[in-house]
Image (cartoon, helix red, strand yellow):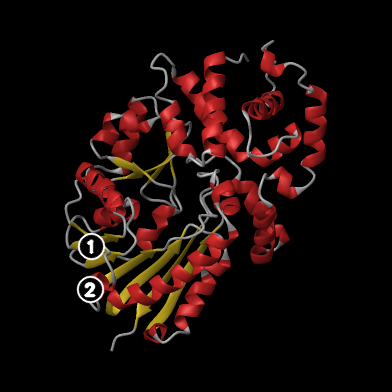
Amino acid sequence: MRLHRNLVFTVIDSLLAIFNEGEYADKVVARALKKDKRWGSADRKFVAETIYEIVRWKRLYAEIAEVKEPFNRDDMWRVFAVWAVLRGYNLPDWKYFENTPVRRIKGRFDELTKTRKYRESIPDWMDELGIKELGEELWTKEIAAQNKQASVILRVNTLKTTRDKLYGILMDLDIETIKTTEYPDALILKERANVFLTDAFKEGLFEVQDASSQLVAPLLDVQPGMRVVDTCAGAGGKTLHIASLMENKGQIIAMDIYESKQKQLKIRAKRNGAFNIEYRIIEGTKTIKKLHDKADRVLIDAPCSGLGVLKRNPDSKWKLKPEFIEEIKQVQRQVLQDYSKILKPGGKLVYATCSILPSENEKQIEHFLNSEAGKDFTFVEDHKILAHESGFDGFYMALLERKKQ
């Protein structure tokens, strides 16, 4: 295995942008991949995967390299050298790799990986929080699973095609997928591929959506002709799933505080052929009050820590702060109080997060049901999805029903 200078330089520049400038890894990777049109798929794969790997294992590699943040360029080369040695590359005779202590790197790796916070490359506070909320044994399994590379999973857009048809279309493009009975609309890619370049994607035959996330809309039990409110729609992955389950009949009100996300949803909805969606920006309590007692179904896909999707967003490990988690819990309490009022008596509500912390999940539902607003609601069921059990993202979803008056 050889290292190519232009690819490695791109990786180094990208890592400095992520670690020192606070840029988001996915945006930096997307930019890096546009750098040279002559790169083939193997070059692009090397750049993307190497950036993500070093982001994922930053603490471990920096500790082995004996460098501290903020990293200067020489520090970053030392971190890269650690990655290359541990991946079995023969270091070329570039000046950046002079005096790289290969044996010491391997020895330090063996020593440090005996300790979980280094082995799983996480901040001290996150390790302590995980133990406190999940217990030592469960946290050890879960954080290890969160460090594995995420699979690419498609959700078939049943407004336009069937799973079997899409399976065949992709097979003709040499993209092999796996069907699974637990996830009726999902196709799991056997190998990573850029599915966004396919005509099937451009024609709206599928969206990329994790398997765990695909369980949320079915739990809501939507029917064609209903009025459904997605209160935190964002870019609309679950909104579009709801539209397909409703067969484009009825009304979905997609709400969000960010106009930019609604613009993304509009583009996706057009491609999906989903035309029963109405878009509303939440400008204050008035927007919500207008909808009181009006919806058959309400989805609260609540803002959260994202601790269930670290395999997909490894830079979150370094961006997330304990204070943010405390703040977001207050937001979760508030949205449950405010948005639950949108539901009609007899209607159903789903509260979902992509977190694995009970304090953001079961405890929030418990707190809501014990509140004044929650007295009108009955708990039906909930699902805790952990990455080490499912192989997919960590998720939580709870189904509540509003009592008939």
Residue closer to the observer: 19 or 262: 19
Query: In the rendered image of this protein, does residue 332 appear above or below residue 178?
Result: below
Residue farthest to the bottom, as pictured: 405
The quarter in which the N terminus is drawn is: top right
Query: In the rendered image of this protein, does residue 191 appear above or below residue 281?
Result: above
Residue 79's x, y, as percent?
Answer: 67, 30
Cα distance in 3D space between marks 1 and 2: 10 Å
Residue type (three-letter) at the residue carrying disc 2: Leu
Per the rendering, the mark at residue 327 is none
Query: In the rendered image of this protein, does residue 32 appear above or below residue 245?
Result: above
Residue 366's x, y, as percent?
Answer: 51, 78
Left or right of 16, for residue 90: right
| Residue at the image point whose x is 48% and y is 71% from the top | 330
Residue with the mark numbered 1: 253
Q: Quadrant of residue 344?
A: bottom left
The quarter in which the C terminus is drawn is: bottom left
Residue farthest to the top, as pictured: 93
Q: Secondary structure at mark 2?
A: loop
Q: Tag 2 or tag 1, which sits nearer the N-term?
A: 1
Query: In the rendered image of this protein, does residue 218 appear above or below residue 375?
Result: above
Residue 29's x, y, as percent?
Answer: 46, 32
Q: Quadrant of residue 155?
A: top left
